[in-house]
Image (cartoon, helix red, strand yellow):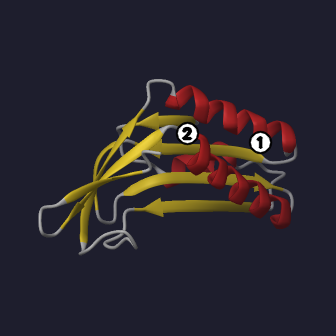
Amino acid sequence: MNEVTEEPLDIPAHVAAVSTGSCGAVVTFIGQVRDHDPDAAGQVTGLDYSAHPDAGRILAEIADRFRTEFPQVNLAVSHRIGHLDVGDLALVAAAASAHRGVAFEACGRLVEAVKAEVPIWKKQYEVDGSHAWVGLA
């Protein structure tokens, strides 16, 4: 389970995808749309996520890279695109291993890599009707 999708993200499915009988630790990261942003003048009401056509492939390659780096950790990660309201899930990652330390490290580094490397951009809407693009560098 490594995808860029327009469908709502399923936390239990990510946990199930990484969990095995040998895993004593399951770590999750849940990124949800918040009602504020340091760059916003007012309250945020929602986001539109857009992705490059290769975003899914790139996300899967990142997950594979971390599987190679952390062979003792099972990983799953998905990013949602399309319109999301405050509270909707934008990014879900799960990591499972025999021990918590390596699961935390793998999950955290995976999330940072997805945020930095996957070509996904967001259009952020504010309560006054204004909007701004974020991540178009």
Residue 127 horizontal/vertical position (percent): 16, 69
The residue that appears at 37% across and 71% down in the rendered structure is 37
Judged from this view, the residue extending furthest toward the left is: 129
Please tell me the numbered disc located at residue 118: 2
Residue in the foreground of this view, choosing between 47 and 64: 47
Reply above or below: 9 against 54. Answer: below
Q: Which label lies toward us, 2 or 1?
A: 2
Residue closer to the observer: 21 or 118: 118
Contact, CB < 8 Å: mark 2 with mark 1? Answer: no
Tell me where residue 38 appears, x and y as whole percent: 40, 73
Question: Which residue is at the front of the view, 5 or 137?
Answer: 137
Give the residue type that dot 1 points to: Phe
Identify the residue shown where x is 57% and y is 26%.
57
Label drawn at residue 66: 1
- Compared with 118, 129 (above or below) is below
Residue 1 lies left or right of residue 110; in this view the side is left
Viewport quadrant of the N terminus: top right
Give the residue at x 75% y 63%.
104
Left or right: 96, with 93 as reference point: right
Indicate the position of residue 119 as horizontal and vertical percent values: 50, 37
Foreground pick, 11 / 71: 71
Q: Secondary structure at mark 1?
A: helix
